[in-house]
Image (cartoon, rainbow, N blue to C red):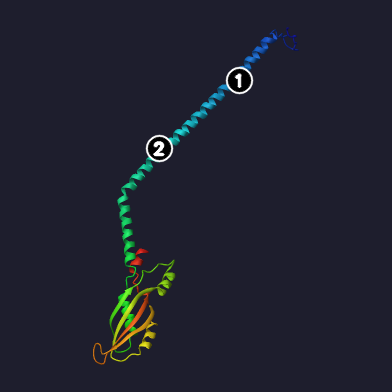
């Protein structure tokens, strides 16, 4: 069926003689070309996305390989320093062992000075039998450590005194208990003329606290 001719005023008359089927075919062809373009664009977009993902993955793999190579280099360097690490560990172990073994190291000069300062006139320290106690235990801070040292047994035994006069041993023992570092003191025995005529020998049991320790090796460990 032919279309009705449309007359446009002011121009030559035109008549569309194309059949309806041909017009529809042309429309379908135009639509098909549009969809083909859309499909091609979608394919190009997908290809671009795949290429981008591949590039990102390739970059990540290269970076991973570089990091693995760097890790291997660091492991090699650490392995090269194993001798140094072993030497430092051995030094630390030996230092700790020395601290444990020498924790009860005594400040002998300080101990004798304290004893001599408490002696009455014409009285001398002529002998002693003293045994160190356990090693000191470090506290959380210096004050805690010092407080624990003043209440723990550091040195215990017997002192031998020689005097030219008869001493009030009870009074001396009580005065000895007030000496810095002395935990306890008790009279042991009195002997007359054992060393020479007119001289007296006294034995006193005494216990010092851990402030008599020198602390030299413990200080080295905490450095």
Relative to 169, residue 14 above or below: above
**Other residues around mark 1 within 10 Å, as few (<14) / some (14–19) / many (≥20):** few
Identify the residue at the far left of this view.
Answer: 196
Q: Residue 3 falls in which quadrant of the image? A: top right
Residue 109 spot, x, y in % from top left: 30, 77
In this image, 26 relative to 81: left or right? right
Q: Secondary structure at mark 2?
A: helix
State which tag comes first along the sequence, 2 or 1: 1
The answer to whether residue 191 is above or below residue 77 is below
22 or 147: which is nearer to us? 147
Write the residue at 37% across / 85% down: 173
Question: In the rendering, which numbered label is found on residue 35?
Answer: 1
Does residue 108 sit above or below 192 in this rendering? Answer: above
Q: Can you say which quadrant of the picture contains the N terminus?
A: top right
Q: Quadrant of residue 133?
A: bottom left
Who is closer to the viewer here, 154 or 121?
154
Q: Residue at x 63, y 16 (%)?
A: 30
**Residue 80: image location, x then y, percent:** 31, 47
In this view, the mark in front (2 or 1): 2
- Mark 2 lies on residue: 65
Q: Are marks 2 and 1 in contact (CB under 8 Å)?
A: no
Residue drawn 30% across the image and 85% down it: 161
Place of residue 191 in the rendered image (x, y in percent of width and height, measured from the top left): 29, 88
Q: Quadrant of the C terminus?
A: bottom left
Label 2 vs label 1: CA separation?
A: 44 Å
Badge 2: residue crowd in 10 Å (few <14, some 14–19, many ≥20)? few
Where in the figure is residue 120, as x and y percent of width and height?
A: 33, 88
The total of numbered circles placed on residues is 2
On residue 56, the disc is none
Q: Secondary structure at mark 1?
A: helix
């Amino acid at each position: 069926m032919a279309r009705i001719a449309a007359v446009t005023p002011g121009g030559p008359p035109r008549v569309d003689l194309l059949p309806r089927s041909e017009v529809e075919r042309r429309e379908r062809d135009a639509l098909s070309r549009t969809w083909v373009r859309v499909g091609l664009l979608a394919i190009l977009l997908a290809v671009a996305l795949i290429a981008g993902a591949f590039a990102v993955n390739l970059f990540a793999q290269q970076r991973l390989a570089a990091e693995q190579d760097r890790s291997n280099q660091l492991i090699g360097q650490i392995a090269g320093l194993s001798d140094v690490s072993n030497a430092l560990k051995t030094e630390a172990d030996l230092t700790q062992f020395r601290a444990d073994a020498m924790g009860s190291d005594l400040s002998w000069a300080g101990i004798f000075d304290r004893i001599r300062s408490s002696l009455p006139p014409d009285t001398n320290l002529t002998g002693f039998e003293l045994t160190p106690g356990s090693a000191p235990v470090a506290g959380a801070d210096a004050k805690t450590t010092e407080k624990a040292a003043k209440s723990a047994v550091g040195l215990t035994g017997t002192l031998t005194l020689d005097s030219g006069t008869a001493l009030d041993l009870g009074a001396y023992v009580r005065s000895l208990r007030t000496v810095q570092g002395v935990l306890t003191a008790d009279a042991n025995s009195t002997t007359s003329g054992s060393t020479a005529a007119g001289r007296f020998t006294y034995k006193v049991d005494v216990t010092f606290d851990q402030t008599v320790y020198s602390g030299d090796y413990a200080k080295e460990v905490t450095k």
